Image (cartoon, rainbow, N blue to C red):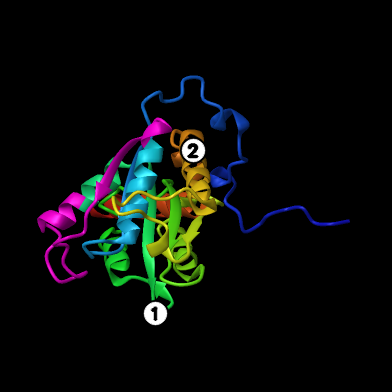
């Protein structure tokens, strides 16, 4: 006979997932709020053009959007957090319910501009986690043949930032061939994939935005909070 006991678990803090907590009687009705970041400062930046194409699609899909432009953003730790561009990025992150990250691939990796933006977003702002539970879509543009190095790296960062990265993604090969002189993306299978990704992002955002606090509620953190409270109460009793 197997032993089904859990001697290492604090029973009062061990919660069985509840379907009722996932089914809301009155879900939010406002448009999904999506922040878009891109990873290049070039005058004709294909990651920016792809990001703007994604924004057009998101608007048609019913989302409210903001595009952050990293011009003037200092290097991480190269300025105080009160710097206007840093403050803008953090405010937009708190505003967002989902995000799109789009980077060029440089030397087999995401760009420094892309990484700098993510590095300026902290895991926590006081008691608030500005990215936890938010949805994320990742895209990249390639100068040559199709690659997935940048999107794979951004997926790792999204997990580290405790975001819900959607399954679909976009990688546009030879991006210089995929946009016309006006900066609009040409019809192609690459364009169709971008439509797929944005559609999926909106669906996942609608599905998870109201229940993200429950989805990201963790036993280990409940235990840590309970232990911290117990320690404070013990300290208070000792000094009385």
Q: Residue 49's x, y, as percent? A: 32, 54
Going from the N terminus, do you reach mark 1 or mark 2 first? Answer: 1
Majority SS type along the magenta span:
loop
Element at label 1 = loop
Q: Is residue 1 magenta?
A: no
Q: Residue furthest front?
A: 181
Q: Vertically, is 107 above or below 14?
A: below
Instruction: Describe residue 207's horizontal placement relative to residue 143 as left or right.
Output: right
> Which disc is residue 208 wearing?
2
Q: What is the quadrant of residue 62 in the picture?
A: top left
Q: Nearer the viewer, residue 104 or 234?
A: 104
Specify the quadrant that holds the N terminus. bottom right
Q: Nearer the viewer, residue 122 or 15?
A: 122
Q: What is the quadrant of residue 40 in the picture?
A: bottom left
For the magenta stretch, what is the residue range? 59-88
Q: What is the quadrant of residue 43 in the picture?
A: bottom left
Q: Nearer the viewer, residue 164 or 69?
A: 69
Residue beneath the point at 45% across and 68% down: 153
The residue to which callout 1 is attached is 107
Q: Residue furthest right?
A: 1
């Amino acid at each position: 006979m197997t032993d089904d006991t859990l001697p290492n678990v604090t029973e009062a803090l061990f919660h069985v997932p509840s379907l009722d907590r996932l089914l809301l009687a009155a879900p939010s009705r406002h448009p999904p709020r999506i922040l878009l970041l891109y990873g290049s400062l070039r005058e004709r930046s294909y990651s920016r053009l792809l990001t703007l194409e994604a924004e057009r699609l998101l608007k048609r899909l019913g989302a409210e959007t903001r595009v952050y432009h990293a011009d003037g953003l200092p290097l991480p730790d190269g300025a105080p957090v009160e710097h206007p561009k840093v403050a803008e990025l953090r405010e937009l992150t708190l505003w967002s319910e989902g995000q799109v990250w789009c980077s060029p691939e440089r030397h087999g990796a995401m760009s420094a501009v892309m990484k700098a933006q993510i590095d300026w977003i902290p895991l926590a702002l006081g008691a608030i986690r500005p990215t936890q539970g938010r949805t994320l879509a990742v895209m990249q543009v390639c100068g040559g043949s199709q690659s997935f190095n940048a999107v794979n790296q951004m997926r790792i960062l999204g997990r580290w930032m405790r975001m819900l990265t959607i399954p679909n993604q976009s990688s546009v090969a030879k991006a210089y061939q995929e946009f016309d002189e006006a900066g609009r993306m040409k019809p192609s299978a690459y364009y169709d994939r971008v439509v797929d990704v944005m559609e999926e992002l909106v669906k996942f955002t609608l599905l998870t935005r109201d229940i993200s606090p429950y989805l990201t509620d963790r036993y280990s953190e409940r235990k840590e909070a309970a232990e911290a409270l117990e320690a404070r109460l013990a300290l208070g009793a000792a000094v009385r």
